Image: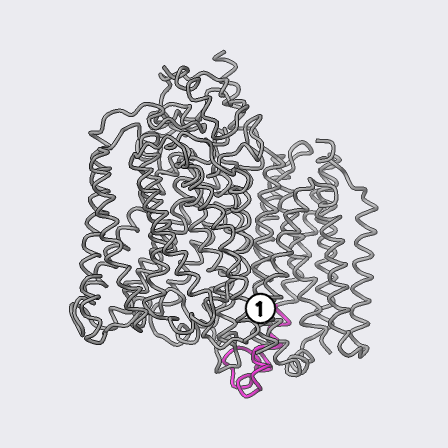
């Protein structure tokens, strides 16, 4: 495939700087997409762990009815922060910023993204946004307590630090937009010769579709947030019902972004799945074009369904049934993907390595999340379970069971490529088992409680929920310790793990044809692409070239 | 590359500018006449024509890569979708 | 081989992909369009709900100042386009001249805006003022949107002035030439967008009678 033969002796990007500095400055001022990707990895992982700890504290509070370890006001701030951190600092930037940055240019045969300096700027904007969010916790007025949706009118009335916290979200959105612009331009302008759109790996397709949502949806929430800040600061009448404003309009504007944002979270994850499954079944992906187009279809349809978050808000009946109907359409491209993945495995030679097992976990958890989504998308049933634990369980299955699980899958899949070391596969497999157990204990119980009528975001509960709340809290301990365990053995592997070969899994996309870790500009010579992306007949050729 | 460097004549720019001014005076004049519910429609129509001139000539999109037009259509379509779907709520509430 | 390779690497660092740069700029402009789109949506909803109040409130805006500002912005768009046209033809002096007039016109636009807003504030019409709060809800919303939308547009004009001033410096110092004027072209695109938004703001606020 790649005409440029690989010289294994080339210096890796860790050893060669893109700028004139060395040491820490060579990282902080780098324009290398791989180094920026790794800086994102460190920052995002940090916030993820903070979010995990906040979640564990919330669960601890709910271990017993009434006050356990904190006041109700603290609890309100805690669930808001858990939401804001997990959504804006982890899941939305997670896969595109880390793995998109690192692998999108490599997978299309480019030396870097289209605007390397802009890429570094997006990283710093992300950091500034994160710092602002942290500062808002400690200023007088107290941490934000509105929930991560910042609904009007409470968000213009509460004395907590809403303005700064949502300004942080605005800044983070800006970072997301710049990353999106960068990726779209990269895909259009920097594909290697022969890399037509239909020879691009599916992760690239998914990231491309995601980038479109990022630039088309994010500005809408940007302006919405800005309007809330202006309303709080100057008392301008826009959403506040006391001045004639329409709080439901705020919800529209908020969800016009925040629903497509759900697809910003899940689409790259689906792209990673489409990479991992062919590699570990040694088969070309079934229905390549169907999967590629379904990414675009999800991006598009995801735009038409936002108001299914608002079925009980008081909007018109006409809008309710229209949005309910449209919501069901999303199931079609999602189904196309799942069926194609499963069809790829059929008669494949399956190699159950850790990344593949993570993907299996994903398919199981995500399917539960997706199917319970139908209960919520359907107007009649949603009215009953709206704002209960059922919704909480649903989106944790989709977001955490979906994107979160794939975050770990991607980390385990690309770890040897990114760091040139291999982790302990046995520990990895054990971790998956505990992850699965902890996850289902923590969240499946919430489906039951929600169905029984336990409202979300409540500090206290009736005695009838005590048993299930307890199981759920114990699940959170298992899940959280597993996550720290995973981070632990990966960090250990970073220093002590055996050296990884350039193609430990037998993949055929371009990143497996260059050394691990990759050299500074990825390719000695820009490759010319002749094969389909998942054509395993070239595997022998690649392995010969490498040895 | 030829296409990319397409130069537009100075006179074209001036003609476009004059027509933009002409449309401005038309829209101001019409606003003075009471046309009932058509007032808004006509005002928006003229604004659309004016923006078409700016986008095509001043912003060169007419002479640029076709993909830019596709992008433009996409963002326009997005706006339409947002407006239409939101108004399903507002009108029938 | 290694020479060739070095050359390729160097060219990678310095080579600027003009089409790519322009594509990036257009994508950014779409985000701007959608940013204002969100506000136009809010405007549309409230105008639909409170059309009478909107008409009454709009009568108080100064159509003359609005029209003058429209003409100023349209003209500044022309001078912007001409500045690019002249650098394409290697006529640096004319390019500088027209770019400076664009900046000048932008400043005049802001001065007009300042007087327009001050007049409103003098009449006691500003957010949280008693005068405004005593009015019906629709009028409060109208003036809220008026301040926010024209204010945000003015902010874009200010940003435009800053960007264009940098371009002027680049132009004078020959950083922008007839060979490499993509920066100027992209700044021009941004400036035209500012004009474009005003083309819609103008009839929606000043011409409701």
Q: Nearer the viewer, residue A531 or C50?
A: A531
Residue C135 magenta-highlighted: yes
Q: Nearer the viewer, residue A521 or A536?
A: A536
Name the residue that disc number 1 marks.
Answer: B86
Mark 1, chain letter?
A: B
Residue A202 spot, x, y in % from top left? 48, 38
Residue A509 spot, x, y in % from top left? 45, 29
Q: Is residue A483 above or below residue A170?
A: above
Tell me the element at label 1: helix
Q: Is residue A10 above or below residue B86?
A: above
- Horizontally, residue C123 falls left or right of residue A148, namely right
Q: Principal SS element in the magenta part?
A: helix
Residue B43 spot, x, y in % from top left? 75, 68
Which residue is the extreme one toward the top? C1
Query: Magenta span covers which residues?
Result: C114-141
Examine the rendering and report whether any part of residue C150 can be seen.
no
- Horizontally, residue C37 falls left or right of residue A355, namely right
The residue that appears at 26% across and 49% down in the rendered structure is A436
Q: Nearer the viewer, residue A291 or A419?
A: A291
Residue C104 spot, x, y in % from top left? 67, 55
- Horizontally, residue B14 falls left or right of residue A269, namely right
């Amino acid at each position: 495939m790649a005409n440029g033969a690989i010289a294994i002796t080339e210096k890796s990007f860790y050893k060669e700087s893109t700028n004139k500095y060395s040491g820490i400055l060579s990282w902080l001022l780098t324009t290398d997409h791989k180094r920026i990707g790794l800086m994102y990895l460190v920052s995002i992982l940090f916030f993820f762990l903070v979010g995990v700890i906040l979640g564990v504290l919330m669960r601890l509070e709910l271990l017993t009815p009434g006050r356990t370890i904190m006041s109700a006001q603290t609890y309100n701030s805690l669930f808001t922060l858990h939401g804001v951190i997990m959504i804006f600092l982890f899941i939305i930037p997670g896969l595109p910023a880390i793995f998109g940055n690192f692998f999108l240019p490599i997978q299309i045969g480019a030396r870097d993204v289209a605007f390397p300096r802009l890429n570094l700027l997006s990283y710093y904007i992300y950091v500034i946004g994160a710092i602002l969010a942290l500062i808002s916790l400690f200023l007088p007025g107290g941490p934000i307590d509105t929930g991560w949706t910042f609904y009007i009118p409470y968000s213009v009335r509460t004395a907590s630090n809403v303005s700064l916290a949502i300004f942080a979200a605005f800044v983070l959105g800006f970072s997301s937009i710049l990353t999106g612009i960068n990726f779209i331009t990269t895909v259009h302008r920097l594909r290697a010769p022969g890399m037509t759109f239909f020879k691009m790996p599916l992760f690239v397709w998914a990231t491309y579709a995601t980038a479109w949502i990022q630039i088309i949806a994010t500005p809408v929430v940007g302006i919405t947030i800005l309007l809330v800040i202006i309303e709080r600061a100057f008392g301008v009448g826009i959403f506040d019902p006391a001045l004639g404003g329409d709080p439901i309009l705020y919800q529209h504007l908020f969800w016009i972004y925040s629903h497509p944002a759900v697809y910003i979270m899940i689409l790259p994850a689906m792209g990673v799945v489409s990479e991992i499954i062919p590699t570990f079944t040694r088969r070309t992906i079934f229905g390549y074009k169907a999967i590629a187009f379904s990414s675009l279809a999800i991006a598009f349809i995801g735009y038409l369904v936002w108001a299914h978050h608002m079925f009980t808000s008081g909007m018109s009946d006409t809008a309710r049934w229209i949005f309910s109907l449209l919501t069901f359409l999303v199931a079609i491209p999602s189904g196309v993907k799942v069926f194609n993945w499963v069809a790829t495995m059929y008669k494949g030679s399956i190699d159950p390595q850790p990344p593949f097992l993570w993907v299996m976990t994903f398919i199981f958890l995500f399917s539960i999340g997706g199917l319970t989504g139908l209960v919520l998308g359907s107007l009649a049933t949603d009215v009953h379970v709206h704002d209960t634990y059922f919704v909480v369980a649903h989106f944790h299955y989709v977001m955490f069971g979906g994107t979160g699980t794939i975050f770990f899958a991607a980390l385990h899949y690309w770890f040897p490529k990114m760091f040139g070391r291999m982790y302990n596969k046995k520990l990895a497999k054990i971790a998956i088992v505990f992850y699965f157990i902890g996850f289902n204990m923590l969240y499946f119980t919430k489906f039951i409680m929600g169905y029984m009528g336990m409202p979300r975001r409540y500090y206290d509960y009736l005695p009838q929920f005590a048993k299930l709340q307890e199981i759920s809290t114990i699940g959170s301990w298992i899940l959280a310790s597993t996550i720290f365990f995973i981070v632990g053995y990966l960090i250990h592997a970073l220093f002590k793990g055996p050296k990884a070969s350039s193609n430990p899994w037998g993949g055929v996309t371009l990143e497996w044809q260059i050394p691990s870790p990759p050299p500074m500009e990825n390719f000695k010579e820009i490759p010319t692409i002749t094969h389909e992306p998942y054509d395993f007949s070239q595997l022998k050729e690649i392995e010969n070239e490498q040895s | 590359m030829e296409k990319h460097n397409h130069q537009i004549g100075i006179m074209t720019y001036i003609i476009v500018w004059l027509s933009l001014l002409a449309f401005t005076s038309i829209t101001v004049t019409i606003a003075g006449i009471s046309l009932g519910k058509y007032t808004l429609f006509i005002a928006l129509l003229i604004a659309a024509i004016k923006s078409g001139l700016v986008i095509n000539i001043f912003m060169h999109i007419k002479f640029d890569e076709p993909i830019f037009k596709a992008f433009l259509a996409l963002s326009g379509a997005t706006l339409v979708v947002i407006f239409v779907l939101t108004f399903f709520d507002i009108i029938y509430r | 081989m290694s020479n060739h390779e070095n050359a390729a690497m160097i060219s990678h660092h310095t080579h600027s992909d003009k089409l790519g740069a322009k594509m990036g700029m257009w994508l950014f402009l779409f985000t701007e369009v959608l940013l204002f789109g969100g506000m136009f949506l809010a405007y549309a909803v409230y105008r639909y709900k409170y059309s009478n109040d909107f008409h009454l409130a709009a009568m108080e805006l100064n159509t003359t100042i609005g029209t003058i500002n429209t003409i100023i912005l349209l003209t500044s768009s022309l001078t912007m386009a001409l500045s690019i046209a002249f650098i394409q033809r290697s006529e640096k002096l004319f390019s500088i001249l027209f770019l400076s007039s664009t900046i000048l016109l932008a400043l005049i636009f802001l001065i007009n805006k300042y007087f327009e807003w001050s007049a409103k504030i003098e009449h006691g019409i500003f957010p949280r003022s008693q005068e405004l709060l005593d009015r019906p809800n629709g009028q409060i919303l109208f003036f809220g949107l008026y301040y926010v939308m024209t204010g945000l547009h003015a902010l874009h004009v200010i940003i435009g002035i800053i960007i264009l001033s940098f371009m002027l410096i680049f132009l004078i110092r020959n950083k922008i030439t007839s060979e490499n004027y993509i920066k100027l072209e992209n700044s021009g695109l941004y400036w035209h967008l500012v004009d474009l938004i005003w083309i819609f703001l103008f009839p929606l606020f000043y011409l409701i009678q």
